[in-house]
Image (cartoon, rainbow, N blue to C red):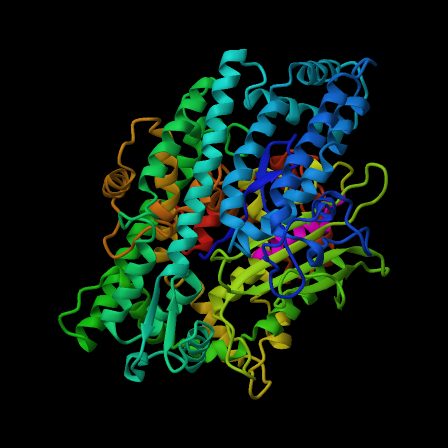
Amino acid sequence: MKRTCLRSRTIRFFLLSLVGIAGAIARGEPNLAREPMNPNDVSILLKTWPGPFGGVPPWDQVRPDAFIAAFDAAIEQAKREIDAIADESDPPTFANTFVAMENAGRALTRLENIFGVHTSNLNIDPIPDIERQVEPKLAAFRDSVVQNTKLFARMSAVHGALGTSDPTPAERRLVDERTRAFIRQGARLSAEDKAKLSAINQRLASLFTEFNQNVLAEEQGHVTWIEEKADLAGLPESIVGAMAAAAGERGKPGRWAVLNTRSSMEPFLTYADRRPLREQVWRNYYTRAEHGDEHDNRAIITEILQLRAERAKLLGYPTHAHWRLEPQMAKTPEATLALMLTVWPKAVARVREEVADMQRIADQSDPGVTIEPWDYRYYAEKVRKAKYDLDFNLVKPHLQLDKLRDAMMWAAGELYGFRFRRLADIPIFHPDVEVWEVVGRTGDHVGLWYFDPYARTGKRSGAWMTDYRVQERIDRPITPIVSNNSNFIKAGPGQPVLISWDDARTLFHEFGHALHGLCSNVRYPSQAGTNVARDFVEFPSQINEHWLSTPEVLNRFALHYETNKPLPAELVAKIERAATFNEGFATVEYLASALVDMKLHLAGDSITDPWAFERATLSEIGMPKEIVMRHRTPHFSHIFSSDGYSAGYYSYLWADALTADAANVFEDAGTYYDPAIAKRLYDHVMSVGDTVDPAEAFRAFRGRDVDTKALLRKRGFPTD
């Protein structure tokens, strides 16, 4: 189970919910010159975006040195707009309070989206220092909105009148959810406690930035260099070529580079015969940010946990986990633990079986080897070949990145009627970026999709979706602009980029988030697209993974890069038979991270050594020694680079329970392309955003509440 995420950020300051992040800079190579700042550079960052399709991000005009002044101006402008709402002399109404809040702060939202690409995709030169200055200012501003007593009084008046007014269901939910969000963020605190809360939030903003910068430095600063060709034994040609290209880009032609990112680490650990090198690559990756140097994150984590615990108590919650879970589908930490601990022992039992299978092969081929974490992927691949006669090296030549991109688009057309048109002369923030217009069945413009597939210096690792602009239709239709970002390694000159089956699933997963944004059809931007509960937002992305393995996609797009022939039927059958292979490993490495996350945030302020707590927690739950957490605490960006997934990493499992049950609807129909079912998915999930409760949305699609046994069946675990 390979999962990634939306990039956490605050979307529309008044909503105060955490979802994905975007941003950008100039067309072509980043323009980071340190010339004297022109006032026009600030103005460009604040103006409504120019260009076609209702405006596009002006990456070709952005100067990073203008960011700080632009943020100061945008924050002041947003303050004035909020004060105007709070000081309105007319009685509070939905229109002059909640709709006005939807329209406030638009310049700041655009600016945050532009800046986000620098922190996620182009985090070089002045950007780290700018981020350190900007994030506390944004935290202080957000608190000033929540703590505006006159604004909250008007919101409360509208909320109190819901029973006597006649709002639409979406309007009622908007008023109710936003008022609750303000209360959860401290709107009812005393003046003294509001000051304490604001100080905590500003300090957390600084710590999140430092944590993120440290992880990025650890990824950029550690490369495993291979100088002897013999040390490449076992590695497929496509991986060797990518390693050579990575070395050449770093000024070392004739060598091979294993970057300190998951997309480089995983294939090396899967195929490299040289065990000492596997261990070196493994240690580089899994010990990021815990070396006792300037990039060590452990003290930062301790302070984050203590501040979160203090904030939760200030807000009236037992722990940070209780505070975070209240607005989610799960509602309570106990509900998440119940699901996780139902799956955990079954996954651990499967790991024992997997390790026994691997050890038997190791005993035959490499006597004296006892399976260690850096061996798991390597020997698992050997077991896969022995058990299922499935060699993914025979699959990978059929998985061309460009073809899979086209496959995602084609499937979206079959499901939602979308067609994609490649655009030129649209500003981009790097030459690698592609821009596509999305049109509907009748040729109407739906939105824009940006695709940024390759790793580069300053780009955080992993894969994610961002939105540059969300869909809305308050006064006029505004179409969404979304992007997908990955870290594939470029191939050598003239060679296609070949990716693994797991990476292909991740590609479809992240595109599912993009489709969630593109399908949005709501009135208010804070309810649009992926602005939904954290443990529901992964459902549209996880369900989209299923279209990768459909015969319609494989026969059209899984074409061998040399022969142009599709995957042989017998190879497809082997993939299907091996669908739950190694599920013990995948589930345990993920669930260990989710359980540690939850237990960290249930422990309150008692943690003084997060590393020791991690070890103790893993021992307590019976973590197999052959596996480590997918995200170890010192570099667990999901939960320590923002509040976004904190006490929320469980959400992938929660959403996968929905996904497994929902997939059965298509399977029972005999096809994943049934028009009526696709329309139901669009009508009740993909298009409605947060206008309805997510449990109701799922129930409307499925016809009943979720059957969690489907999750166990999907993973090949016993259901009793």
Residue nearest the observer in this picture, 360 or 320: 320
Image quarter where the C terminus lies is: top left
Looking at the picture, how far across and down is residue 423, in whole percent? 75, 67
- For this orientation, the residue located farthest to the left is 368
Image quarter where the N terminus lies is: bottom left
Range shown magenta: 510-521
Looking at the picture, how far across and down is residue 146, in whole percent? 61, 23
Looking at the picture, how far across and down is residue 384, in whole percent? 36, 71
Q: Viewed as shown, does residue 337 lie left or right of 293? A: right
Residue nearest the observer in this picture, 403 or 605: 605
Residue 590 on the magenta segment: no
When the figure is inspected, residue 4 is found, relative to residue 569, above or below; the finding is above
Question: Which SS type dominates the magenta stretch?
Answer: helix
- At x 49%, y 35%, the residue is 205
Task: Inspect this view and state whether residue 557 appears.
Answer: yes
Residue nearest the observer in this picture, 615 or 388: 615
- At x 81%, y 13%, the residue is 91
Task: Inspect this view and state whether residue 375 appears.
Answer: no
